Image (spheres, rainbow, N blue to C red):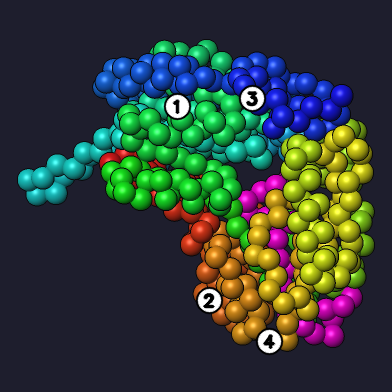
Amino acid sequence: MQISVEKINSPGVLQSVNPSNGDIVWDGMASTKGDILRAAENAKDSFPNWSGRSLSDRTDILKKFAGILGNHKDELAKLISLEVGKPFWEAKTEVAAMIAKVDISIEAYKERSSEFYGGKAATRFRPHGLVVVIGPYNFPGHLPNGHICPALLAGNTVLYKPSELAPATAEFVMNCWKEAGLPFGVLQLIQGGPEPTRFLVNLPEIRAIFFTGSSHTGKKLAQQFAQKPGMMLALEMGGNNPLIVDPEYIRIIEGAHQIILHSSFLTTGQRCTCARRLIVIESTKSPAFIDTLIQKTKNLKVGDPFADPPPFMGPLASISCLDRVMLAQQDLLDKGAVPLLLAESTNPGTGFITPGILDVTDIQNIPDQEIFGPVLTVQTFRTVDEVIQKANNTPYGLAAGVWTDKGSRIFNLTTKLRAGVIWANTYNKFDPSSPFGGYKESGIGREGGLHGLSAYVK
């Protein structure tokens, strides 16, 4: 029998379900209010000793943690694949990013947070204290790790609440920290769904919250703490990201198509930076460009995360995720979208779905929503000004992309697009030393490298 996490996550029971076949991956208990209060007390009590340790001591523990992850990288990758359906090859790249984050954090801390002197004044940086990290399901290892490593390095203590879809991944990572010698109380795991989260973020001891997830939840957090300016908030909330293509001025059509496929459908469309809106500058080459894209999308391999040869896409992370994507697609169809390729649920009782492409050029008042799955919308416009206006006409502003060989057009588009990350003739390529974050409702704060470390000290 297929059991959804939403139905069993009350009262106190928590299971993670393999979205490929419905098997139970992890079975345990959600944290109670008493558990959370004890964890907060432990973290608060451990703060003076942890923050008082030398940077060298904290650095040594982080490096040991990275080594332990390296020793167990395939085990952790397998667990990620089982819990959230990510292809095994891709889960291994996630674990590699977790390992790399340690050295990135250490180097950034040395450059950003070392004390310095100006005249007779000394500037020193201090940790916030007790902080909360709330992780997502799409990168259940990498994204929370991106907050935990620099937060611990700076001397903070952490309450970590992972996605309820990936409790086993979080528990595995916690065991790696314990093996690395992290003192008791410094990092505490809080398991569960919305109820434990709501109780957790209302604890008076908290000094910072680092959240990755939906815009809906992120805005609630921002509203909740609007009257508490002393609370540090870093909110990464996704986006309805445009990718602009200019078929008239693209020499390597194959490269452009590959970029679109990867930007839209990698991780089964469950990346906050995924291209959601393909905006095409109209020309005589546009129809053929779109037709070829449809054919290439049909050929993407969807299958079991551990299949050989490996699939490009696995299932969505849960049945409820699939239901939301299918409802969003149907809503667009009801409003007049033209189905160039329908996304379809292929295996009842699982999260498997094929990628879809919808032409929404002629729809009035298109819903401005992040469809967190493999559904790409397409619009065509005649002028660059129209394209820029449509790309920016969104409350979001996380990522955007441009593909054209016309240099002046690259400059014009990239300078006028309003997004925190803008790619030209590539997409979803990251320099780990660069900051990451968005405009408007895509969030506040920056992650990554030198600039990202500013969130973890004051």
Q: CA distance from mark 3 to mark 1?
A: 21 Å
Q: Residue furthest left?
A: 120
Q: CA distance from mark 4 to mark 3?
A: 53 Å
State which region is magenta: 264-288
Going 31% across and 45% down the picture, which residue do you hit? 228
| Magenta stretch: includes residue 281 | yes
User: Does the image show residue 98?
Assistant: no
Q: Which residue is mark 3?
A: 10
Q: CA distance from mark 4 to mark 2?
A: 14 Å
Q: Which residue is mark 1?
A: 159
SS assignment at label 3: loop
In the rendered image, residue 201, in percent from the top left (x then y), is placed at 43, 34
SS assignment at label 4: loop
In the rendered image, residue 168, in percent from the top left (x then y), is placed at 65, 22
Along the line of sight, the residue nearer the viewer: 204 or 146: 204
Along the line of sight, the residue nearer the viewer: 228 or 359: 228
Count residues near mark 1 (Cα–Cα under 10 Å), then give few for <14, some for 14-19, many for 20+: many
Q: Specify the label residue 383 is tagged with.
A: 4
4 and 2 marks in contact (CB < 8 Å): no
Q: Amino acid type of disc 1?
A: Leu
Of marks 4 and 1, which one's residue comes earlier in the chain? 1
Q: Amino acid type of disc 3?
A: Ser
Q: Which residue is mark 2?
A: 416
